[in-house]
Image: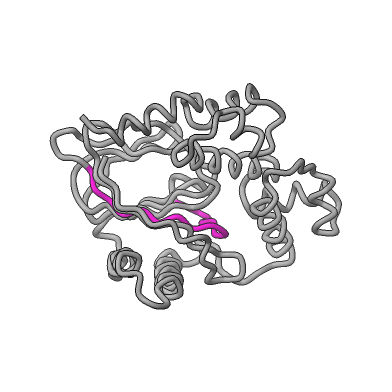
Amino acid sequence: MSEQRYDLGRRSFWEDCQLLYVARHRFENDWLSLPHTHYCAEVFDILGGKGFFQVESQQFPLRPGDLVVVNPDTSHTELSFADNPLEYIVMGIDGVRFQGAGDGEDRYFHLSADQLEGDYRFYLESILSECDGRRDGFLDVCAGLAQAFLVLLRRQIAQRALSPARSRSNSECGRIKRYMDEHYSENITLDALAAQAHISKHYLIHAFNKEVGCSPISYLLARRIAEGKHLLENSSLSVREISLSLGFSSPSYFTQRFKKAVGLSPLEYRLSIRSQARGP
């Protein structure tokens, strides 16, 4: 797979909303397509080619111009036709969740090209251009473009998207998410998280599930797995060293949780990434 990717270091634009990355992908024969999850939401703009998008056990066809939004902690993957490979732009955004997503309920929604009102691609391509040029203030420009994109999307799907207005429980959950993002390598318990937000752990579990769509511990695990993938891809640390740096109790437990989330063991994942980098 050819990839043009920019990691933006958590650029905030609403109170708890952060632009994480934007990338342009094009499928090639070496791409290993496996179901996976993210702790953030992802937005896909299909540029060309043919294929399917799989969300958990459901699949639907993709056409150029389609827009797909996948909520956090939702298993998904992209499946491309070999003779007409998919190409798309994907943007990762933390702190937002879309609701009432059609057939996918709160997991995803799919807007076909003829349903879209507005030039969504302009914002995504502009973010890519800003990242490529890296001119003064480009991160702030990227954050502004991402905010405009989401406002346009929310306008189209009306009440189905989470608005930036903050409820009390939303603010508490945002504080807990930030704490886990910053301290994921530490020994974090539900009692400690509840103390951070000054609420009972039973209320925390209920509010976090309602606002984020998963339990606090599931979010923490997804955060650690995402960081583990990054370290496996970009460092020479051993699996043992990575597991300890992420706060797992043992390398075997890290391997067990990683394989369940990604579909490959940490070593298998590292080998597949290196194989893709070497090419045919």
**Residue 258 locus on image (x, y percent):** 55, 30
In the rendered image of this protein, does residue 97 appear above or below residue 234? below
User: Where, quadrant-wise, is the N terminus in this rendering?
Assistant: top left
Q: Nearer the viewer, residue 69 or 2?
A: 2
Q: How many marks?
A: 0
Which residue range is magenta in the image? 86-101
Whether 58 is among the magenta residues is no
Is 143 rendered above or below residue 66? below
Residue 220 on image: x %, y %:
66, 43
Tell me if 126 is positioned left or right of 19 in this view. Answer: left
Q: Quadrant of the C terminus?
A: top left
Q: Residue furthest left?
A: 83
Residue at the spot 53% in from the left edge and 32% down from the top edge = 261
Camera-nearest residue between 95 and 274: 274
Displayed quadrant of residue 165: bottom right
Quadrant in which residue 79 is drawn: top left
Location of residue 221 in the rendering, given as x and y in whole percent from the top left corner? 63, 39
The single residue placed furthest to the bottom in the displayed view is: 136
Q: Quadrant of residue 85?
A: top left
- Residue at figure coordinates x 84%, y 45% from the top left: 191
